[in-house]
Image (cartoon, rainbow, N blue to C red):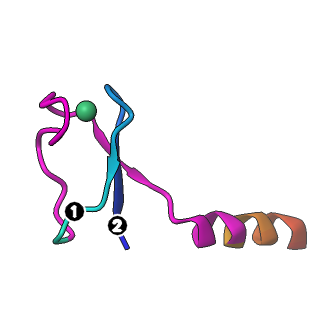
Amino acid sequence: MLSLHCKECNYKFTPKKDVIPKTCPFCGKEGTLEKVKPMQKIIDEVIDEMDS
Ligand SMILES: [Zn+2]
């Protein structure tokens, strides 16, 4: 599932479709939204690092 985080106001939310809105729905700033890594992916990457 796609999660987004606003760098401006730290608002976190999940868009209904997998589309990143241009503006933050909370503070209304443009271009401040970034994807939040799913926790499982972070765990997988850590395991990958341990193997190597
Ligand atoms: Zn915001």
Instruction: Look at the numbered disc 2 and give the secondary structure of its residue.
Output: loop
Q: Real-space Cα distance between discs 1 and 2? A: 7 Å
Point out residue 25 in the picture as x, y percentages from the top left corner. 15, 42
Compare residues 51 and 40 and report the one nearer the observer.
Answer: 40
- Badge 2 crowding class, 10 Å Cα cut-off, few under 14, some 14 to 19, many 20 or more, is some
Check whether the beta carbons of the residues at disc 1 and disc 2 lie within 8 A of each other. Answer: yes
Q: Which mark is residue 36?
A: none
Q: Amino acid at mark 1?
A: Pro
Residue 20, image x and y in percent?
19, 55
Which residue: 77% across, 71% down? 48
Q: Is residue 22 above or below residue 20?
A: above
Is residue 31 positioned above or below 25 on the image?
above
Q: Amino acid at mark 2?
A: Leu
User: The magenta stretch spans which residues?
Assistant: 18-43
Quadrant in the picture for residue 14: bottom left
Figure quadrant, ligand 1: top left
Q: Earlier in the sequence, mark 1 or mark 2?
A: 2
- Pointer 1: what residue? 15
Nearest the eye: 49 or 8: 8
**In the rendered image, which quarter is residue 7 located in?**
top left
Which one is nearer the viewer's eye here, 44 or 27?
27
Q: Residue at x 81, y 64 (%)?
A: 49
Secondary structure state at the residue bearing disc 1: loop
Residue drawn where x is 36% and y is 60% of the image: 3
Q: Does the magenta segment cover residue 30?
A: yes
> Is 3 left or right of 27, judged from the image as shown?
right
Q: Quadrant of residue 17?
A: bottom left
Q: Quadrant of the C terminus?
A: bottom right
Q: Residue at x 33, y 28 (%)?
A: 9
What residue is shown with label 2? 2
